Image: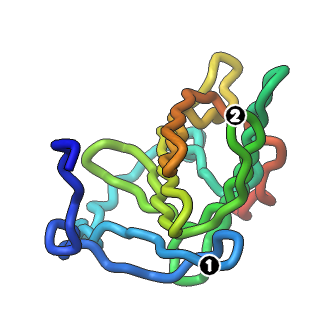
Amino acid sequence: MNGSVRPSLEALESRRLMTATFATGGLCLIPPPIHVPAPVHHHHPSHAAPSPTPVGDWLASSDNAALQVQISQARSGDLFAKVAFTGATSFQSSGQLNYSSTTGQFSMWVMSPKLIIKFSGTLVMGDRQVPEFHGSLETYSRKGAFKAQFMLQKTNFPPARPL
């Protein structure tokens, strides 16, 4: 053995394994749900800006790589992301996108026999008061690892909700 430590299923027992689409299929590691206390409602002026939402299509591209992410929300409130990357390695995958209220980060893990993908980032308001998604994309395979930082721009916006 080369002295490296591999995580065992016992080390991952606090996570739920769910199926997700990756080429012909794979596993998606999803952290256990976090209990969040019910929000306390305060009265705010009606002119307060709405908080940005990750739902929609996002894009980042350069001369040698492109990352496209489509985020949707189920009726249950769960978020799902379809991630497509072309560049040093190319793949398409989808899975549940989780939000951590502690870190303010969204994250998705997808595992298959050939590739492990970690997509994570934070939603921020950019210079022009337009939402941006800042984060990283990591892949791990038998051939090596790849990590890229990104700043995704929203390419479409969901319809406005009535006030």
The mark nearer the N terminus, 1 or 2, is 1
Element under label 1? loop
**Identity of the residue drawn at 59% across and 44% down:** 52
Compared with 15, 2 (above or below) is above
- Three-letter residue code for mark 2: Ala
Look at the image and tell me in which quarter the C terminus lies. bottom right
Left-right relation of 7 to 147? left
Q: Which colouring convention does the figure follow?
A: rainbow
**Identity of the residue drawn at 49% across and 56% down:** 116
Left-right relation of 147 to 81? left
- Mark 1 → mark 2, Cα distance in angstroms: 22 Å
**Which disc is residue 80 wearing?**
none
Compared with 19, 122 (above or below) is above
**Which disc is residue 88 wearing?**
2
Looking at this rendering, what residue extends furthest in the front direction?
1
**Identity of the residue drawn at 49% across and 38% down:** 145
- Three-letter residue code for mark 1: Gly
Return the residue at label 1.
25
Q: Estimate how packed mark 2 is, as few (under 14), some (14 to 19) or many (20 or more) residues with alpha carbons within 10 Å.
A: few
Left-right relation of 148 to 84? left
Q: Is residue 58 visible?
A: no
Front residue of this view, candidates 88 and 55: 88
Position in image of residue 150 (x %, y %)? 61, 29
